[in-house]
């Protein structure tokens, strides 16, 4: 069984190694959480370049080196090379840094849930890394239900004792 946790990452340096689609998804979520996101990759996909131009992320245009882990609290290994991702995981573990390895869930310290955001409510769906496709399907079903304009789920929560006031 996994221990669910919500991390406060505002202002915290988080490293994402890789410049493609997976790195983009991870970086976007981290930016939305207020993290200081540093991308290490020789090249960036177009969307990451746009984020860089807006000042949402920092970029180190190089291949991964352990030195880039300095002052990092969390790292995402999202390269297209398993050997590099494994090295990032080992280096992070040696330094006590939480690490998610995109293509090696068994070697990761944590999994990233599929999220549904609806106003002040955020629902995380996880299969513990066993089936990201199932988590995605559940997320889409819940999001669809909440998007009907009525926000039935949030309205119900607001009727409960200690409810959300927003």
Image (cartoon, rainbow, N blue to C red):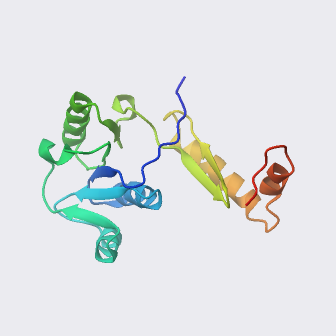
Q: Which quadrant holds the C terminus?
A: bottom right
In the image, residue 7 above or below residue 90: below
Q: Which quadrant holds the N terminus?
A: top right
On the rendered structure, is 146 left or right of 40? Answer: right
In the image, residue 129 lies at what x, y percent?
A: 48, 35
On the rendered structure, is 135 left or right of 22? Answer: right
Q: Nearer the viewer, residue 142 or 57?
A: 57
Q: Quadrant of residue 62?
A: bottom left
On the rendered structure, is 60 left or right of 166? Answer: left
- Residue that appears at 79% across and 44% down: 162
Q: How many marks?
A: 0
Q: Quadrant of residue 165?
A: bottom right
Q: Nearer the viewer, residue 25 or 70?
A: 70
In the image, residue 28 lies at what x, y percent?
A: 42, 61
Q: Quadrant of residue 144?
A: bottom right
- Residue that appears at 80% across and 49% down: 157
- Residue that appears at 26% across and 58% down: 39
Q: Farthest right residue?
A: 159
Q: Nearer the viewer, residue 144 or 70?
A: 70
In the image, residue 7 above or below residue 51: above
In the image, residue 119 lies at what x, y percent?
A: 68, 61
């Amino acid at each position: 069984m996994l221990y669910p946790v919500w991390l406060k990452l505002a202002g915290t340096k988080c490293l994402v190694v890789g410049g493609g689609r997976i790195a983009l998804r991870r970086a976007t979520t981290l930016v939305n959480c207020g993290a200081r996101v540093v991308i290490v990759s020789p090249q960036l996909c177009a969307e990451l370049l746009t984020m860089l131009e807006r000042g949402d992320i920092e970029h180190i245009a190089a291949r991964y080196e352990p030195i880039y882990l300095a002052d990092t609290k969390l790292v995402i290994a999202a390269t297209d090379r398993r050997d590099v991702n494994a090295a990032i995981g080992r280096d992070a573990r040696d330094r006590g840094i939480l690490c998610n390895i995109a293509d090696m869930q068994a070697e990761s310290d944590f999994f990233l849930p599929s999220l549904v955001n609806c106003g002040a409510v955020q629902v995380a769906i996880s299969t513990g890394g066993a089936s990201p496709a199932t988590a995605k399907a559940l997320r889409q079903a819940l999001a669809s239900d909440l998007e009907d304009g009525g926000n039935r789920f949030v309205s119900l929560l607001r009727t409960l004792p200690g409810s959300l006031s927003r």
